[in-house]
Amino acid sequence: MAKHNELGKWGEEAAVKHLESHEYVIRHRNWRRGKLELDIVAAKDDVLIVVEVKTRSNDYFANPEDAVTMKKIKHIVRAADTYIKFYQLDNPVRFDIITLIGNENKFELEHMEEAFFPPIF
């Protein structure tokens, strides 16, 4: 496995541990339907939380959350809509971003709740 893939997999695992330690229930990890994917789908207080995880070894060139562009947001929202319809859910939805900078020995994690709102298509 390529080094960046290993870093991303580790980052998602750390994000799940963070969420679970804050009493989130993990519904799915790397949920896919066709070309659509959601990193983490969680729930807390009857709210469905869609979490995009961005992991970087450093932030020399950009902050990890900068990789969540409008194009990426639209893709996440489409995937979330498909997820909601597939499971016939009627819960409020929140979109979060968790960023991790560093490695498994030393890292900074930031959880941005309500990081973005669905754009109007």
Image: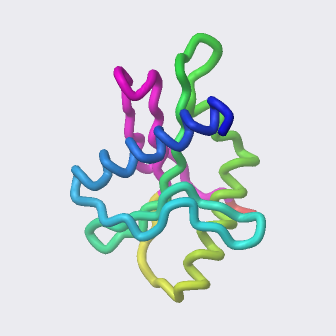
Image coordinates for residue 106, horizontal then vertical, percent: 35, 21
Q: Relative to residue 30, is residue 97 depicted above or below?
A: above
Q: Is residue 28 left or right of residue 8?
A: left
Looking at the magenta stretch, what is its main secondary structure?
A: strand
- Find the magenta span and give its range: 95-119
The count of marks equals 0
Q: Give coordinates of residue 102: x percent, y percent.
A: 45, 22
**Which of these two is toward me, 106 or 6?**
6
The location of residue 121, given as percent across then percent down, is: 75, 63
91, 79: nearer the viewer:
79
Depicted 93 relative to depicted 59: above or below: below
Q: How is the image coloured?
A: rainbow
In the depicted structure, whether residue 1 falls above or below residue 94: above
- Residue 14 in which image quadrant: top left
Residue 42 pos. (x, y %) = 40, 64
Quadrant the N terminus occupies: top right
Query: Farthest residue in the top direction?
Result: 60
In this rendering, is residue 109 above or below 72?
above
- Left or right: residue 44 versus residue 30 is left
Answer left or right for 43 relative to 97.
left
Asked if the magenta segment contains residue 84, the reply would be: no
> In front: 11, or 42?
11
Residue sitting at 70 percent across and 48 percent down?
72
Residue at left offset 42%, top offset 46%: 13
- Indicate left or right for 87 with 37 as reference: left
| Residue at image coords 54%, 33% | 7
Residue 108 located within the stretch drawn in magenta: yes
Identify the residue at horizontal 39%, vertical 28% (top origin): 104
Query: Farthest bottom residue?
Result: 88
